[in-house]
Amino acid sequence: FLPHLVASMEEVEQTYIMIKPDGVQRGLVGEIISRFERKGFKLTGLKLFQCPKELAEEHYKDLQSKPFFPKLIDYITSGPVVCMGWEGVGVVASARKLIGATNPLNAEPGTIRGDLAVQTGRNVVHGSDSPDNGKREIGLWFKEGELCAWTAVQEPWLVE
Ligand code: GDP
Ligand code: MG
């Protein structure tokens, strides 16, 4: 009975989840964190952070040419965000499902955006869209020493 060996045979991924300034201002931090916690993923990093403009631009560089880009940068830098690293088997795609569609009006009830938001420009939370971007974004938002590798006591109760 060696759950760590079983888990290591499947893909353990890292994803970057961020509660955007509207989520912080609206008092939704605990609500949002608890959804990932209850699902069974493992928190590896957590901080409240005022994002500088340069970092917001780097994080969203793929959207640079979009007409909403300046508004997006203003939004993300308009107040503190909560930066998180989460780890688990299949965590990247699963977190995107928990978050829901980009436009909260299209997001299913039960998802974070479906339950807690109404507009794309105020959609309360970010989640990496691929394992490669998960690693890239965690590297972007966290410094060395800010992340923790640890064993959760609940692990054998989550993975057979
Ligand atoms: P996500 O991966 O679901 O967050 O969506 P995208 O990667 O396509 O876009 C990143 C973020 O840019 C979204 O979460 C929104 O905050 C913002 N965004 C995307 N499209 C629009 C838009 O049409 N208008 C505005 N105001 N913001 C947008
Ligand atoms: Mg995206």
Image (tube, grey):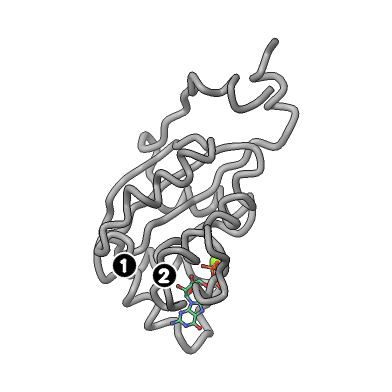
Residue that extends furthest to the bottom in the rendered view of this protein: 67
- The outermost residue toward the top is 1
Residue 142, image x, y percentages: 39, 46
For the residue pair 16 and 53, the one nearer the viewer reads as 16
Q: Residue shown at 38%/43% (left/top)? A: 143
Residue 89's label in the rendered image is none
In 3D space, how far apart are the residues under numbered discs 1 and 2 (Cα atoms)?
Answer: 10 Å
Instruction: Find the residue positioned furthest to the front.
Output: 109
Q: Which of the two discs, 1 and 2, labels the residue nearer the N terminus? A: 1
Task: Determine whether, in the image, residue 93 is placed left or right of residue 121.
Answer: right
Q: Please give the residue where the numbered disc 2 appears in the rendered image.
A: 117
Image height of 142 relative to 133, above or below = above
On-image quarter of the C terminus = top right
Quarter assignment of residue 115: bottom left
> Who is closer to the viewer here, 82 or 108?
108
Look at 41% across and 36% down and name the residue there. 147
Q: Which amino acid does label 1 sit on?
A: Asp
The answer to whether 81 is drawn above or below residue 46 in the figure is below
> Residue 36: percent from the left, percent from the top?
48, 44
Query: Residue sitting at 48 percent across and 39 percent down?
Result: 38
Label disc, if present, on residue 22 of the rendered structure? 1
**Where in the figure is residue 18, as x and y percent of width and height?**
41, 56
Badge 2 amino acid: Ala
Q: Is mark 2 on a helix, strand or loop?
A: loop
Q: Residue at x 42, y 31 (%)?
A: 148
Classify mark 2: residues with Cα within 10 Å, few (<14), some (14-19) or many (20+).
Answer: many
Mark 1 vs mark 2: give the one in front: 2
- Horizontal side of 72 relative to 135 (left or right) equals left
- Mark 1 touches mark 2? (CB < 8 Å): yes
State the SS at label 1.
helix
Residue 141: give x, y in percent of width and height: 40, 52
